[in-house]
Image: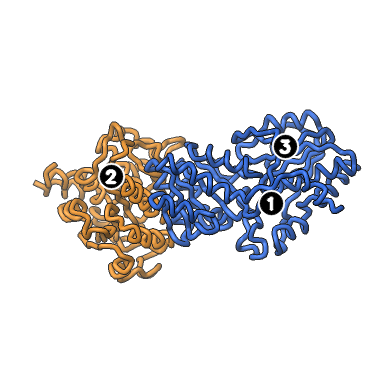
C-alpha cells in the first residue's frame, strides 16, 4: 500500500467511525479518532495476521487495552477483511457481538478488554511465552493515557523490563484528555518518558498522526536489545473533525445529523487534498 | 478419651495439600514443558522452590503483584501454555478478582488459579490473610470451575486433571497436613462429590480441610450415639453434583454442610439453593464462619470457636436429630 493510499485509508476509517457511532448513537468518538491512525498503520503496515486463520500461533499479537475505543478497532478490522463491514450495522444492538468493547467473538480480536489496565499484563504473558518458545512474532498493545494511573500497568512495566521483553511494544495514544478533563488535571503523569526509562523501557516519541513516523517506529524495533519498547504517540482527541479536536465533550459525544454531515464534508475535503 | 482422639486413630495422616500440589506439578512438568508455575513471591509458601530449581524455564516470578500475576498467566494461557498462577488465596481472589473475572473467565483463558494457605490457614495473621470470601466471589463469576480437595488423593487427582483442562479453574489448598479420608472410594471427577463414608441417619457435606472433621464427627456419632452418617467430600463447588443432591433430597434425611468459609455464598448456600428449588424438604443446616469480625488464633482454634470441628459438628448433629 502506497503512502497516499494509507493516508486515504485513515480518512475512510475516520468516516466509518463516525458513521457507525452516529448509527448506534453510542461510542467513544474522540479517542477512536485519536488512535485510528495507529490502528491503520498496525493493520496495514505492521502486524503479521491472517484474516482467514486468525489464531495461527505465530501471528503478531495486538491487544487493545483502551478497549472503549473499539469503534476504531472494528472499522479497521472490517476494512482489513476480518468480517463484512455490514456486521457493524448491529453495533451495540441486542445480542450483537459488536459491543462497546473488544470481544473475542469478533474475528480478529485477540482478547476481551474494556476494564482499564488489563492489556499490558496479558501482553507480558504473551511476550514471555514467545521468548520461551524462541518465536519471532511481536506483541503490541495500545494504552490510553487516561488508564496510566491503573497500578496493574506499573506492575507490568516492571515485569516487562525484568524479563527483557524486547518483543513487546506498548503504544500510548497520548491525546492528553480523559472523561473528566486533561490528564494533567485529573492525575498528572508528566515526565512519562523519564518514568518509563527508569522502569527499564526504551522509549520513542512520535507524532501519532504522522503515518510514516508510526510505520518507521513500529517496524524498526527493538529500539534497544533486551528492553521493552514504548511509543508515546502524541495525538489529538477528535482528530480530523475541526469542532471535535481537543473538545472534551466528544470523549463519548455522539454527533447530531447536522454535526455528522459537517464532519463528513470536512473529511471529504481532507481526502480531496490527498492527491 | 477425647472425641478427637477416638476418631483420629482410624485415619492415616498425609501431608499438606499444597505440598502435594507442588510435587504433582513437578512430576507433570518433567513430561510437559508447557506447564508453567507463575508465582508472586509465593514459591516458598507454595512449596515450589524445588520446582524452580529443577525447571528454571518453567517458572515465571512476577514479584508481589497479584494483578500482574493473573494477567501474565492469562497471556501465557492464551499463547498455549498451561500456567498455574500460585498465590495465597486471600490475595489471589480479592486483589486480582477483576483479572480473574475478565482476563481469565470472560476471556476464556485456561489459567489454573491456585489459592494456597487458604481459608484460615494463616489464622493468627488476621483477616487480611484469611480467604473466607473466595467461594462466594468465584461462584458469581461465569466460566470457572471451583475445586477444594480434602485430602492428598483428591489433590493429586485435581492437579492432574486441571493441567489439561481447557477452561479456567480455581484450586484451593490449605497449609496443614491432612489425613487420607477413604481407601475404598478412590474415584475423582470434577463435579462429582466423593462419598467417603456411608450412613443412613444424616448427611454431612463438607469440603477441603473441614471434611476430616466431618469424618471424625461421623465416627463419634456412630460410636457414642449409634447414629450413622453419610459424609461427602463435595470438592467441586461449581459445577455442583446435582445428581448426588437429588439422591439426598429423595432420602429426605437431615443435611449439615461444613466449610472453611463465610456462611454467605459458599458450599452450604450452593447446596441449599439447588435443593430447595427442587422442592427438597430435608432439615438443612449450614456450618461455617458467621458474618462477623473473624476471631483469630490457630486454624484449629478458629474451627473450634465456630464449631467447625469434631465436637461442634457432633453437637449440631445430635441437636438436629433430636428435633
Q: Secondary structure at mark 1?
A: strand
How far apart are the two marked residues, 1 and 3, measured between alpha carbons? 19 Å
Q: Secondary structure at mark 2?
A: loop
> Chain A appears in which tint?
orange
Q: Which chain is blue?
A: B
Residue B260 marker: 1
Q: Which residue is mark 3?
A: B196
Mark 1 touches mark 2? (CB < 8 Å): no
Residue hosting label 2: A135
Q: Residue at 70% x, 64% y: name it.
A: B296
Residues at marks 1 and 3 on the same chain: yes
Please check whether the numbered discs 1 and 2 fall on a single chain: no
Residue B247 coordinates in the image, percent (x, y): 74, 29
Of B53 and A251, nearer the camera is: B53
Q: Residue B197 location in percent, x, y?
A: 76, 36
On-image quarter of the N terminus of chain A: top left
Amino acid at each position: 500500500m502506497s503512502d497516499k493510499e494509507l493516508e486515504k485509508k485513515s480518512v475512510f476509517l475516520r468516516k466509518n467511525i463516525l458513521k457507525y457511532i452516529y448509527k448506534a448513537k453510542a461510542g467513544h468518538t474522540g479517542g477512536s479518532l485519536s488512535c485510528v491512525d495507529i490502528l491503520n498503520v498496525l493493520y496495514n503496515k505492521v502486524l503479521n495476521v491472517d484474516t482467514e486463520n486468525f489464531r495461527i500461533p505465530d501471528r503478531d499479537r495486538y491487544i487493545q487495552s483502551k478497549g472503549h475505543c473499539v469503534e476504531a478497532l472494528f472499522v479497521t478490522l472490517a476494512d482489513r477483511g476480518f468480517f463484512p463491514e455490514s456486521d457493524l450495522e448491529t453495533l451495540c444492538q441486542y445480542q450483537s457481538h459488536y459491543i462497546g468493547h473488544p470481544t473475542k467473538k469478533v474475528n480478529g480480536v485477540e482478547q476481551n478488554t474494556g476494564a482499564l489496565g488489563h492489556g499490558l499484563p496479558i501482553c507480558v504473558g504473551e511476550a514471555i511465552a514467545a521468548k520461551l518458545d524462541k518465536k519471532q512474532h511481536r506483541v503490541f498493545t495500545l494504552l490510553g493515557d487516561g488508564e496510566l494511573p491503573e497500578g496493574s500497568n506499573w506492575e507490568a512495566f516492571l515485569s516487562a523490563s525484568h524479563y527483557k521483553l524486547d518483543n513487546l511494544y506498548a503504544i500510548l495514544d497520548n491525546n492528553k484528555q480523559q472523561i473528566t478533563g486533561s490528564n494533567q488535571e485529573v492525575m498528572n503523569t508528566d515526565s512519562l518518558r523519564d518514568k518509563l526509562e527508569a522502569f527499564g523501557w526504551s522509549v520513542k516519541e512520535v507524532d501519532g498522526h504522522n503515518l510514516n513516523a508510526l510505520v518507521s517506529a513500529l517496524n524498526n524495533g527493538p529500539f534497544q536489545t533486551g528492553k521493552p519498547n514504548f511509543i508515546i504517540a502524541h495525538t489529538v482527541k477528535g482528530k480530523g473533525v475541526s469542532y471535535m479536536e481537543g473538545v472534551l465533550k466528544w470523549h463519548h459525544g455522539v454527533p447530531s445529523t447536522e454535526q455528522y454531515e459537517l464532519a463528513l464534508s470536512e473529511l471529504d475535503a481532507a481526502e480531496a487534498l490527498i492527491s | 478419651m477425647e472425641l478427637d482422639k477416638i476418631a483420629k486413630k482410624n485415619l492415616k495422616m498425609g501431608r499438606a495439600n499444597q505440598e502435594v500440589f507442588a510435587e504433582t506439578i513437578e512430576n507433570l512438568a518433567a513430561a510437559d514443558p508447557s506447564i508453567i508455575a507463575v508465582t508472586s513471591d509465593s514459591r516458598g509458601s507454595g512449596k515450589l522452590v524445588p520446582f524452580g530449581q529443577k525447571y528454571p524455564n518453567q517458572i515465571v516470578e512476577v514479584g508481589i503483584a497479584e494483578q500482574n500475576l493473573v494477567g501474565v498467566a492469562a497471556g501465557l494461557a492464551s499463547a498455549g501454555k498451561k500456567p498455574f498462577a500460585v498465590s495465597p488465596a486471600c490475595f489471589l481472589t480479592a486483589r486480582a478478582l477483576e483479572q480473574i473475572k475478565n482476563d481469565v473467565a470472560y476471556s476464556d483463558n485456561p489459567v489454573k488459579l491456585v489459592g494456597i494457605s487458604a481459608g484460615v490457614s494463616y489464622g493468627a495473621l488476621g483477616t487480611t490473610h484469611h480467604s473466607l470470601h473466595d467461594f462466594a466471589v468465584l461462584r458469581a463469576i461465569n466460566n470457572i470451575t471451583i475445586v477444594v480437595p480434602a485430602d492428598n488423593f483428591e489433590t493429586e487427582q485435581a492437579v492432574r486433571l486441571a493441567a489439561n483442562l481447557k477452561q479456567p479453574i480455581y484450586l484451593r489448598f490449605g497449609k496443614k497436613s491432612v489425613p487420607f479420608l477413604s481407601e475404598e472410594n478412590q474415584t475423582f471427577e470434577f463435579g462429582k462429590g466423593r462419598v467417603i463414608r456411608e450412613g443412613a441417619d444424616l448427611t454431612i457435606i463438607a469440603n477441603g480441610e473441614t471434611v476430616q472433621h466431618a469424618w471424625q464427627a461421623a465416627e463419634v456419632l456412630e460410636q457414642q450415639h449409634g447414629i450413622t452418617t453419610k459424609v461427602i467430600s463435595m470438592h467441586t463447588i461449581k459445577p455442583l453434583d446435582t445428581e448426588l443432591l437429588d439422591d439426598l433430597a429423595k432420602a429426605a434425611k437431615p443435611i449439615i454442610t461444613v466449610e472453611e468459609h463465610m456462611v454467605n455464598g459458599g458450599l452450604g448456600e450452593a447446596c441449599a439453593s439447588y435443593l430447595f428449588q427442587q422442592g427438597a424438604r430435608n432439615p438443612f443446616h449450614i456450618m461455617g464462619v458467621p458474618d462477623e469480625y473473624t476471631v483469630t488464633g490457630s486454624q484449629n482454634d478458629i474451627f473450634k470457636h465456630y464449631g467447625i470441628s469434631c465436637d461442634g459438628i457432633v453437637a449440631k448433629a445430635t441437636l438436629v436429630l433430636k428435633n
